[in-house]
Image (spheres, helix red, strand yellow):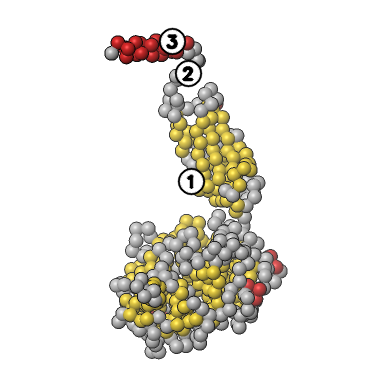
Amino acid sequence: MKRIKEIIGVLLLVTGIACTEDKGNYNYTPLNELTINGINKTYVAEIDSVLSISVNIIGEKGFREDDYEYLWYAWRTSDAKTTDTLSLKKDLNVKLSIDVGEYTLRYVVTEKASGVFFESEIDLSVIDKYSKGVMALSRIEGDYSDITFINVKNTVTQHAYKQANGNSVGRHPKGIFYIGGEDDVKNVVLISTEERTITVEPKDFTDFMPLSEWFYVKPEGTIVEAFATDAGKWYEYLIIDGKAYNRRVFSTRDPFWKFDPKIKGDYHLAPFSLYGAGKFFYERDKRCFIYDRYGTMMAPEALGSAFNANDMQMDMLYGTAIGENLRAVMVDDNGKRYMISGKEIDDWDRVTYEDIIQIVAEKKLEMNYTGAAEATCFAISTKEPDFLYYAYGNKIKCVSMLTGNELSEYTMVQPVDYMEFDKSENPDRLYVAVSDGSGTTGSGSIYYLQMNPQGGGALLPVKGGEFKNVCGKVVDFEYKK
């Protein structure tokens, strides 16, 4: 015990000497903690526009602007080594001269006396007039095709293709599609008319590769009727004159990966994407659902009593698939219209390892609603697959595909030509095109509506989403990034 006491004494003596000899100059002034307000998490700005961010800084012990230094700088998300200083002032108010792209913007506030700093990071998208936004394909004088583009800052570019190439896409417009983009596969825009289908560069709408060069074997037809992919974007399909062509896009790494020869079989597909849980399509001549099984079209197993997926005896007016949820509007030989709901099942037996390919019929409801027989277009959001919207005249009605109840009605200023829900970044946003029906330049307008976040299927106008006299008679919308 005496030995232990001696050791403890020596340790205490050494500790005391160490404390006595420490002559460091320390500042124990409490830190003035700052709170930085007024900065959003994400900003989108057009190149050469002024980006303004007014900052409100609050200090626990008060705040004097002159006691601090300020720095705003940005770097591409793909290149953190190269930075651009935007401003040395407390508030940002600068004309953006950096290139189009995705950036991280950092704001640093440093106390001059102590060197202590506070920072905030922001996602910044710098765009131009052709960056991400919605494309509208419309019919104008002489049945020629025209493209109107509205970017995410609501800048409108009319006659986008003609501005870039000096001529029209072709006559009798059919559809516009945005393909690629996964695993380094090149993005392109497909524009389809009854005369031809072309591919254009998304950045400026200039002509790109001929459609035939996207295929290992030249397709039998020339008119792209529909584009299909699933939520995971593993495969992409093009329906060309009723035939299906696909390509794998996951883990590809080849920007110009081509489409395989047509899927085998005797079939003629309806121009709708039913690629949800599995690679399902609708055969318009035999009037049944079919499935791509390893490059050959086959009939799925039909389950449920609401309808017979192998013998529908109806034509498809509109169809979509959201995950496993199959939704469609059908018409029979007597002109009666129906809403159908079902499940797509693409699985395999864990014991026998055999594929399980099924359509489970859940609901078939006759559309005995006002205007349903005259409806010209239909839309379903990926956010709420049980709400069907249909347009007749200048009205848009929403009904439940499960209960059959009428939920809401919205009135437009002119008759509706076409409408479609966004399939990308804003799934509750409905793009609506109206016109006087003449199909002339400037006769049509575009409106953005959104589903009421409180539910119930009601539609609300989007602030700033009104673009008057910017198109002809719209036949298709597509969002591009």
Q: Amino acid at mark 3?
A: Ile
Question: At label 1, which amino acid type do we have?
Answer: Lys
Q: Which mark is residue 17?
A: 3
Residue density around tag 1, few if under 14, some if 14–19, many if 20 or more, within 10 Å: few
| Nearer-the-camera pick, 163 or 116 | 116
Of labels 1 and 3, the one closer to you: 3
- Judge left or right: residue 208 versus residue 41: right
Which quadrant holds the N terminus?
A: top left
Q: Nearer the viewer, residue 7 or 312?
A: 7
On the image, which quarter does residue 183 sit in?
bottom right
Q: Is residue 152 left or right of residue 450?
A: right
Q: Earlier in the sequence, mark 1 or mark 2?
A: 2
Residue 119 percent coordinates (x, y): 51, 36
Kindly report which numbered mark, 1 or 2, lies closer to the viewer in this rendering: 2
On screen, residue 42 above or below 332: above
At x 67%, y 66%, the residue is 206
Q: Which is more foreground, mark 3 or mark 2?
A: 3
Q: Label 1, label 2: how many angstroms apart (C-alpha)? A: 35 Å
The residue labelled by disc 2 is 27
Answer whether residue 269 is visible to the viewer in this image.
yes
Find residue 380 and report its horizontal and vertical position in percent.
42, 69
Q: Amino acid at mark 2?
A: Asn
Q: Are marks 3 and 2 in contact (CB under 8 Å)?
A: no
Name the residue carrying label 1.
41
